[in-house]
Image (tube, helix red, strand yellow):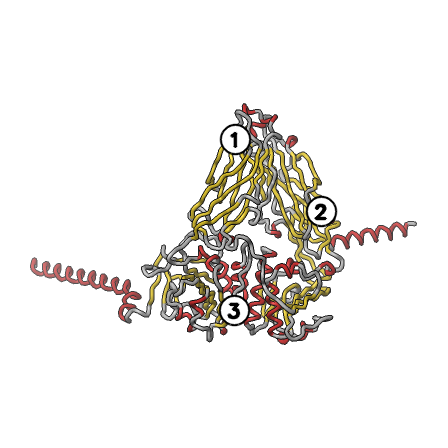
Amino acid sequence: MNKFFTLLALVFLLSKASLAQTQTIVSFASFGQEEDEAIYGMSGASLFYFKIPPQNQINGSKLVLRFEPSQALIKENSFINVIINDKPVYSSRLSKDSIQTLVLNLSKEDLSPGRFLKIQVKTLLTITDDICKDLDNPAMWLKVKKDSYLSLVKDAKGGLDNVNISNCFDTKRAIVYPAEPSLNDLKAVAWAYARLKKATNKPIFVFEQGKVPDSVKNYIMVGNMGSLPEDKKSLIREVSAQSGEGLLYLSKSMTTVTDTITEKVNQKGKLVDVKRVASENVAGEILFVTGGDEEGYLKAVTTLGNVNILNSSFGNYLIINHAENTFIKTIDENRSKITLKQVGGSSDFLSGVGSLKNAYTFKNSDFSFTPKEVEIRFIGNYSGLNPGDRGYFNIYLNGLLISSEKLDASGKLNTSVTINRYQHHKYNRLESEFRFFPANGQCKNSFINFFGEVDVDKSYLESKNPFISSALSFYQYPEAFNLGTTKIVVSKSIAKFTAGALGEIIYELNNNINPNNFPEFAYSEGFPEGDLKKNNIIALLAKEDPMLKQFKSAPIQFDQKFTLYNADNRSTPVYSVAQSDSVSSGLAQIFYGTSNNATLVLVATGPDAHKSDAFLNVSKSITEQLSTLSSNVCVTDVNSNKYLFNINKSSDNLEYTETKSPLTQFWEKYNLYILLGILLLILLSFLYVRSRVQRSQELYND
């Protein structure tokens, strides 16, 4: 009997150990929640959306919430409520701990369609026994910590049975392409990169064939069937692409890997990195984007830009006989008017006293052109005010109050405010606020009496006038390329270094509510000069490419040696042709072409080993939240420092050195030393003459 119980205990311990080994801890920070989420006010809420990878099971997984309440709260009269997938799962008073931890078991009923985990944290906080005094007390807050986490159960088979083409993009972070890529290869990398970036906020890596780290086992491989390595080509089974056919094929396998791994382990309520040597089964996934020939390969690449096809491909392979990117046309074709629902807003029913807020985000590229002015209109309903009640509807843009309107007994909301180009940025946060105070401070009897709701289907943002300037700037990128045909031109000599940058560009061109910008790709060699005038141009060129001479209206002419200086410190050059061969730099300039067509030119200099990073850094820098409306030249260095310039004919921070005579260049280089020498000669001459005069006086006196 003792042996039986000993065996039973051993089985139990082994099963517990096995379970522990299949747990993966994923913090909120790794999901993109980089800061603690603060919930303000007496009655507040915060919403989290996390997509659960298909490799994990939700049954048996856990949600571990860590939260920090304000120390000014009366804890026994303050409450926290957790709602998962719109169903209440936990309610409790706050304890007296400064940081509190809550562990909740998860099940498949907690997942919404698309394997999203929707978590809502609601609070009801108290500081005093007088509710009216608590309404605007700034000490009313609770923070959901960024080190809260999900403890997810790994599928015993790596979850491969649940992975298909439609959901495999969510976990991939790398793209592999041929060492000598063709235009179709570059196009494939760009569209694959854009698709991955829409699925994650984590870095995406691009590797040449043969340079993929051993640790990377989940990636996209692009290339014509003839260019795929033999060991990878052998993974494509069950199906083969014929001439003229494209193929998307998902290869899945399990391998045993022994390595030193770093895991986040919960130790005394804190996540700690722990290293250990372990052998584990690792799922390997490769999504091949290929074709029976170049024609078929191009069809597969075209399919990468069609989200509708990708999202409905639930198998492991897709044969493509015909491919096109034709999207349903919207009523408002030029996207000058967009609803709050189109930018991700939802109609939330708000009730209570004090501040009741909703937040929305929008960006300039959501419109078909850079707006000069934007009309913001809110339409909704609220409970009509009784005599003596005070109510307001406030609108905030990027943290600043831009409109405030009194509420009345009608219960109908229809208000608007127009903002100019100096008030809105490339990326904007818009907030609406119902603010209600009952008559005579009777707060306790009014909690359920006031409600408000913004109708996101009827509320809208409208740009009536495009922002037009004599010179194009990065503030107008990428909207300047929305109208007309865009062609991407690449120097053949540096094509292999442009893959990541092309992905960033394709992503930005389609980072809006109706992505439909499918540029054509071409090499700069033999590119028709007439096409430079008929199309919008995005060029990634070598410094020596002759095409640079054709951009006569560019802020900087590359056929001459030049130096760029910082406007605040002209003594130190930021970029010069003389140093560009040894220092890795990326340079971008945006301008109108000879036919008023939008043109963006990117150049990378320095050793080949760093050119990919140089192109990638500068392509990212021009999309960031810029503080100026007139920057048309951007320089980035190897340390990811960014310098913005507004270059025009009268600029004093651009200097062409070849236009100066050798004597002028010598003078500018050594003028300080020459002047010091002259001053020294004058001083010595003065001392010599003075000594001679003194000696003469002494002789005369003698």
**Where residue 287 sits: x, y (%)?**
66, 65
Does 372 sit left or right of 518 as displayed? Answer: left
Which mark is nearer the camera, 1 or 2? 1
Q: Is residue 614 above or below residue 78?
A: below
Give residue 408's mark: 1
* Residue at figure coordinates x 71%, y 71% from the top left: 239
* Residue at figure coordinates x 30%, y 69% from the top left: 659
Kind of residue at disc 1: Asp
Residue corresponding to mark 3: 521
**Where residue 506 sits: x, y (%)?**
53, 62
Give residue 110's mark: 2
Which mark is nearer the camera, 2 or 3? 3
Kind of residue at disc 3: Phe
- Under circle 1, the secondary element is loop
Question: In terms of depth relative to the viewer, which is nearer, 410 or 475?
Answer: 410
Mark with earlier residue (1, 2): 2
Mark with earlier residue (3, 1): 1
**Where residue 296 sits: x, y (%)?**
62, 72
